[in-house]
Image (spheres, helix red, strand yellow):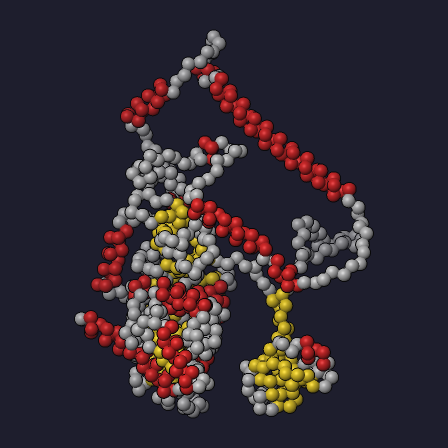
C-alpha cells in the first residue's frame, strides 16, 4: 500500500466502527480558560449525536451513527502536569483551551514546553468566550492572540467555541486532520483505562488482580507479553476478555427512558464495572511456557570472578616479583625466615609511629569534646531551676513568622548556588584535606598522561551493581531485529480497536486508589527485554526557565518514552571519546549525558527530567457551616441559622459561599443583629442549603514513648487474691 493509501486508511479507521474511538484530551492553558463552557458546547450536539457519560469528572463520549464516527473526551486535571503528560502519551488529539485575551499563562507555557519535548500528537486550538467584549475589542483581541501563537503553532488555526455550529466545525476538523505519530507508542500496544475493577488476592488485600477495560491502540496486544502501568511498574497478565463495547455506534436504549436531544445510553459507575458484570468472552489465557518473565535483574554468582589455576607464565611472573621484593635485614642468630618476616626496619617503625600519633590525636579530640560537653552540662546545671517571670506586652507579627519559616530552605538553596558558581569558576578543583592523608583520600584516583588518548579498561574495577544488569553484545542489531519483527510478523492477540478487559496480576491496591482519585490509568505493552535493568544514557539539555541548580546524584523524576520513574543520575560531557568527564551540575550552556540504572527502553524515546519538591506534608481539617435560605430573589437571598450575631457575619464576610448544587456566592451585608445576612450568588437558588467551608492545619500529638512495659499475663488465680490485669491496645 502506498503512503497516501495508508494515510487514508488510518483516517477512516480512527473513530470508526472497526477502530478505537477518537481520543481527545482537553488541556486548559490558562487559569481563566473556560474549559467547562467548551465541554458543554461539545456535548450539546444535534439529535443525530448520542452522548454517553463515563461517570468520571470531565469524561464523556459522543456517538454519531450517521457519520459513523465516535469520540471520547477526557479532561486533564488542572495543575497536574504528570497527568497531562501521561494522557498525551496515548491521546489521538489534544484540544488546547485558550483564554481569549492572553492565550496562555506561565503554567500553560511550562505545560506546552513539556508537551513539545515529550512529543506532540495532533492538536487543535479552541477559544471559548470573548462574546461579552465590544466588536472592535473582540477583533483586536483576536489579532493579538493570532500573533501570539505564531511562534508556538505556526500553521495552527484558531477555532472559536461559542455556538453549537462552531463546535460542529471543531469536531469535523478533529476527525479529518492528519494524525501525527509518536514512535515510542506506534510500536507498542497501549490503552487508556475506560473502567477498572480490583479483586483482592487470597493472601493479602493490598495486592490482587486488576481488571482494566479499554480500547486497544497501536499494535496487537498479546496476553503472554508484559504490560507497564505508567507510574506503577511492570506486570504480567493472566487472561484477556472481550466484554460488550460500551461505545458501539448502535447503542442499546435503556428501557423507561425517552430519546432526547442528549440521550444518555449508559450511566457507568465510578469504577466502571457495570459492563464487567455482563456475559464476557474469554479471548485468550496466558501460557506459562510462552509468557514473558518479570525477572529484571541478573542474580550474580559470587564465584564468577574467581580465577582459574595460574598458568606457567603467571607463576614465573609471581616468582620474579617475589625476588624483586626481597630485602636484607639484620637478625639475631638462630632466627627463622618466618620470624625474620616480622622484624621491621626503621622506616616501617616511623610509619607505625605516625599512625599511632594519628590515633592519639583522635583520642585527644574526643577527650576535648567530652570535656566541653561536661562544661556545658555543668553550666546548665548552675542555672536556677525557676526563673523570675514578669508580664510584658509583645507585638505579634504573624507575617514575619511565616516569612522566616523558609529561611532554612533559602540557606540551603544559597549554598547550592555557591557550589554551582565555584564549580563554574574552578571546575573539578578540590582542597587537599589536612586530617586525612592524600594517598588515602585519593586512593581510588589515578594519573593520566592524556585524558583523551590514555587507555582505560572498561571492565576494570566494576561495582557489584554491574553484575545485576543485562548487557547486549550488539544493542543496535537487537533493536533493528525487534523492529523488523514488529513490521513483518503478525502477532496473535487482541487487534487494534477491540474493547478488551485485561487481567493484570499482582497489582498493589494503590493503583486502583489512584484511578478512583481521577488519575489516568495508562498501560503499555513491553517489547522483549524491556523489563530488564541496564545502564541507560540520555542526552538532555537544561531548559532556560529552570534557574535552580541541579546537582549530580540528586533524585529526579524521569519521563522516558512511556515510562515514569525516579532515579539519581550522573552527568557527563557529551563527547565522541572513549572516556567522558563527570559534571557535578547540570549546566545551562551545554547538552550533557545523563546515566542511570533503569529498565531497557528501545529508542527513539523522548526524555524529560523533573526536580522533585521536598515539601512537608500538610494535613488540613475541614469544617462546614450550613445555613438556610429565608427569602430568595433572582441572584440574592437572605440566609439565616448559619450565624447568630452580627459580629460573626462581618468576621466571615470574605469567605466564599457555595451550595450543594454548585452555586457560588459571597456575603453582601448583615441584616439585623441575630445573624441574618444578605448573600449574592451566580444564579437563583432552589431552597438548597448554603454552605461555608473552613480549614485549619492539624498536627499529630507527641505520644512517642520508647519504653514499652511488658504486658502482665492474663492468669486465673487459684487463691482469693485479686490478679492485676493490664490491657494492651
Across and down, in percent, residue 355 comes to 53, 26
Vertical order, 180 against 71 (above or below): above
Q: Name the residue rendered at 40%, 59% in the picture.
A: 543
Residue 280 shows in this picture: no
Residue farthest left in this picture: 2
Across and down, in percent, residue 676 comes to 69, 85
**Number of marks in picture:** 0
- Compared across the picture, whether 350 is left or right of 445 comes to right
Quick one: quadrant of the N terminus? bottom left
Splitting the image into 4 quarters, where does residue 674 fall? bottom right
Q: Name the residue rendered at 32%, 37% in the picture.
A: 450
Quick one: quadrant of the C terminus? bottom right
Q: Nearer the viewer, residue 321 or 179?
A: 179
Q: Name the residue rendered at 43%, 43% in the picture.
A: 426
Across and down, in percent, residue 109 comes to 42, 67
- Compared across the picture, whether 115 is left or right of 11 comes to right
Splitting the image into 4 quarters, where does residue 91 fall? bottom left
Q: Nearer the viewer, residue 668 or 490?
A: 668
Q: Name the residue rendered at 62%, 31% in the picture.
A: 364
Across and down, in percent, residue 437 comes to 49, 31
Amino acid at each position: 500500500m502506498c503512503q497516501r493509501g495508508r494515510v487514508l486508511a488510518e483516517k477512516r479507521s480512527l473513530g470508526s466502527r472497526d477502530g478505537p474511538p477518537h481520543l481527545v484530551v482537553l488541556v486548559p492553558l490558562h487559569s481563566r480558560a473556560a474549559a467547562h463552557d467548551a465541554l458543554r458546547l461539545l456535548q450539546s450536539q444535534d439529535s443525530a449525536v448520542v452522548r454517553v457519560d463515563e461517570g468520571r469528572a470531565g469524561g464523556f463520549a459522543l456517538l454519531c451513527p450517521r457519520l459513523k464516527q465516535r469520540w471520547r473526551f477526557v479532561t486533564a486535571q488542572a495543575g497536574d502536569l504528570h497527568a497531562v503528560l501521561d494522557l498525551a502519551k496515548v491521546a489521538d488529539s489534544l484540544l488546547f483551551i485558550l483564554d481569549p485575551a492572553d492565550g496562555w499563562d506561565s503554567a500553560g507555557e511550562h505545560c506546552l514546553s513539556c508537551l513539545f519535548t515529550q512529543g506532540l500528537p495532533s492538536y487543535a486550538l479552541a477559544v471559548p468566550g470573548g462574546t461579552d467584549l465590544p466588536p472592535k475589542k473582540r477583533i483586536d483581541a483576536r489579532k493579538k492572540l493570532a500573533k501570539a501563537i505564531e511562534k508556538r503553532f505556526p500553521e495552527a488555526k484558531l477555532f472559536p467555541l461559542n455556538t453549537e455550529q462552531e463546535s460542529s466545525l471543531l469536531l469535523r476538523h478533529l476527525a479529518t486532520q492528519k494524525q501525527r505519530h509518536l514512535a515510542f507508542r506506534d510500536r507498542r500496544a497501549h490503552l487508556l483505562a475506560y473502567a477498572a475493577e480490583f479483586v483482592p488476592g487470597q493472601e493479602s488485600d493490598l495486592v490482587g488482580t486488576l481488571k482494566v477495560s479499554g480500547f486497544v491502540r497501536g499494535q496487537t496486544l498479546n496476553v503472554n507479553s508484559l504490560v507497564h502501568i505508567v507510574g506503577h511498574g511492570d506486570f504480567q497478565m493472566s487472561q484477556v476478555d472481550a466484554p460488550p463495547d460500551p461505545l458501539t455506534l448502535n447503542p442499546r436504549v435503556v428501557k423507561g427512558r425517552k430519546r432526547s436531544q442528549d440521550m444518555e445510553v449508559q450511566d457507568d459507575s465510578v469504577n466502571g464495572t457495570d459492563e464487567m458484570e455482563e456475559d464476557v468472552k474469554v479471548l485468550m489465557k496466558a501460557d506459562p511456557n510462552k509468557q514473558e518473565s518479570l525477572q529484571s535483574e541478573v542474580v550474580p554468582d559470587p564465584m564468577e570472578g574467581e580465577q582459574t589455576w595460574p598458568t606457567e607464565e603467571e607463576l614465573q611472573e609471581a616468582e620474579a616479583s617475589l625476588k624483586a621484593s626481597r630485602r636484607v635485614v639484620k637478625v639475631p642468630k638462630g632466627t627463622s625466615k618466618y620470624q625474620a618476616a616480622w622484624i621491621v626496619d626503621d622506616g616501617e617503625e616511623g610509619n607505625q609511629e605516625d599512625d599511632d600519633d594519628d590515633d592519639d590525636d583522635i583520642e585527644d579530640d574526643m577527650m576535648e569534646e567530652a570535656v566541653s560537653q561536661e562544661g556545658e552540662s555543668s553550666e546548665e546545671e548552675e542555672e536556677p531551676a525557676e526563673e523570675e517571670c514578669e508580664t510584658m506586652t509583645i507585638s505579634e507579627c504573624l507575617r514575619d513568622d511565616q516569612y522566616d519559616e523558609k529561611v532554612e530552605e533559602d540557606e540551603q538553596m544559597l549554598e547550592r548556588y555557591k557550589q554551582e558558581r565555584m564549580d563554574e569558576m574552578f571546575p573539578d578543583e578540590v582542597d587537599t584535606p589536612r586530617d586525612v592523608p592524600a594517598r588515602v583520600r585519593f586512593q581510588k584516583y589515578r594519573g593520566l598522561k592524556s585524558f583523551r588518548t590514555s587507555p582505560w579498561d572498561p571492565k576494570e574495577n566494576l561495582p557489584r551493581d554491574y553484575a545485576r544488569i543485562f548487557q547486549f553484545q550488539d544493542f543496535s542489531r537487537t533493536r533493528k531485529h525487534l523492529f523488523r519483527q514488529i513490521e513483518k510478523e503478525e502477532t496473535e492477540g487482541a487487534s487494534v480497536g477491540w474493547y478488551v478487559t485485561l487481567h493484570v496480576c499482582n497489582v498493589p491496591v494503590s493503583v486502583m486508589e489512584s484511578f478512583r482519585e481521577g488519575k489516568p490509568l495508562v498501560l503499555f505493552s513491553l517489547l522483549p527485554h524491556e523489563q530488564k535493568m541496564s545502564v541507560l544514557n540520555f542526552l538532555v539539555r537544561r531548559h532556560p526557565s529552570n534557574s535552580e541548580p541541579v546537582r549530580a546524584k540528586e533524585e529526579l523524576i524521569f519521563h522516558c518514552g512511556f515510562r515514569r520513574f525516579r532515579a539519581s543520575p550522573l552527568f557527563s560531557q557529551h563527547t565522541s571519546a572513549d572516556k567522558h568527564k563527570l559534571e557535578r551540575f547540570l549546566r545551562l550552556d551545554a547538552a550533557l549525558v545523563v546515566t542511570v540504572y533503569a529498565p531497557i527502553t528501545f529508542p527513539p524515546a523522548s526524555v524529560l527530567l523533573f526536580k522533585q519538591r521536598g515539601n512537608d506534608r500538610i494535613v488540613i481539617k475541614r469544617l462546614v457551616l450550613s445555613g438556610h435560605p429565608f427569602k430568595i430573589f433572582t441572584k440574592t437571598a437572605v440566609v439565616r441559622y448559619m450565624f447568630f450575631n452580627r459580629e460573626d457575619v462581618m468576621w466571615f464576610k470574605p469567605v466564599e459561599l457555595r451550595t450543594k448544587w454548585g452555586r457560588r456566592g459571597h456575603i453582601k451585608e448583615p441584616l439585623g443583629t441575630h445573624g441574618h445576612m444578605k448573600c449574592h450568588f451566580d444564579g437563583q437558588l432552589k431552597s438548597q442549603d448554603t454552605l461555608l467551608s473552613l480549614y485549619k492545619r492539624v498536627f499529630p500529638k507527641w505520644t512517642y514513648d520508647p519504653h514499652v512495659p511488658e504486658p502482665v499475663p492474663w492468669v486465673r488465680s487459684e487463691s482469693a487474691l485479686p490478679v492485676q490485669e493490664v490491657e494492651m491496645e
